[in-house]
Amino acid sequence: MKLFGSVPSPYVRRIRMLLADTSYEFVNLNIFAEQDRATLIRLNPTRKIPMLVDGDQVIFDSGLIYRYLCQKLQLPALSWPQENQIILINAANDSLVELLICQRSGFDTNDDKLFFNLQRERVAEVLAVLEQQVRDQAFNDWNYAAICLYCLLDWIAFRNLWPLGSFPALQQFLSQNQQQPGVASSDPRQAG
Ligand SMILES: N[C@@H](CCC(=O)N[C@@H](CS)C(=O)NCC(=O)O)C(=O)O
């Protein structure tokens, strides 16, 4: 199996952490560099990472990759509450990706514009809901939903995308899980 992605991407990192104890090849792409972008486009018309190549099969999207790996590696299927947790995490993650791309395109994402307001409102609301869920011990087990939350929060911290000061439970969740399998080896700060 080959996983194509980048080191900083939180969507890629969740799969790397999931596969921490599994043998596979990680192909690190810079999707904005010409040659790697050609690889991305050849394999995945959505032009997003990650994608997984297993023999002739190419699987797009971290959610589908999880389902594929569930079958292949007999991982536990997600419960409905876990699926909902991942939907929440993805909603904040997608909005932050959009805001980051807008910033890199030269926009001031703090402008009072509908698109930016919608993304910022979504991120603020979702983080508040996740803070409450962590307080309610809904993320106590180290399962795939917890991995997704860890990857979102650590990416926010790494890229300085959103102040986490008003979310003490989320900050504690991050510091409590630093020793989990695959966390250190997939840390974008360690990438050489
Ligand atoms: N739904 C996708 C989202 C993947 C995604 O947004 N990846 C980002 C990197 S973190 C990306 O490839 N962005 C490139 C772009 O938006 O052009 C998944 O779960 O894999």
Image: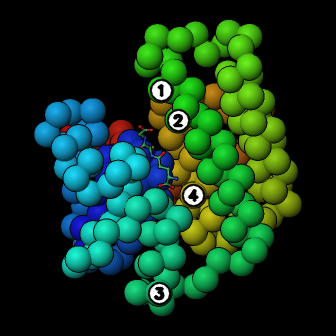
Q: Is residue 23 above or below residue 86?
A: below
Local secondary structure at mark 2: helix
The reply to whether the residue tagged 1 has its Cβ within 8 angstroms of ligand 1 is yes
Q: Which of marks 1 and 4 is nearer the N terminus?
A: 1
Residue drawn 63% across and 65% down? 145
Residue drawn 14% across and 39% down? 35
Residue matched to label 4: 148
Local secondary structure at mark 3: helix
Using the numbered discs, state the Cα–Cα distance from disc 3 to disc 4 in whole angstroms: 19 Å
Local secondary structure at mark 4: helix
Residue matched to label 3: 71
| Mark carried by residue 97 | 2
Q: Label 3 neighbourhood size at 10 Å, few (<14), some (14-19), many (20+)?
A: few
Q: Which of marks 3 and 2 is nearer the N terminus?
A: 3
Residue closer to the observer: 86 or 117? 117
Residue matched to label 1: 101
Q: Which of marks 4 and 2 is nearer the N terminus?
A: 2
Using the numbered discs, state the Cα–Cα distance from disc 1 to disc 2 in whole angstroms: 6 Å
Local secondary structure at mark 1: helix
Residue drawn 58% across and 34% down? 96
Q: Earlier in the sequence, mark 3 or mark 4?
A: 3
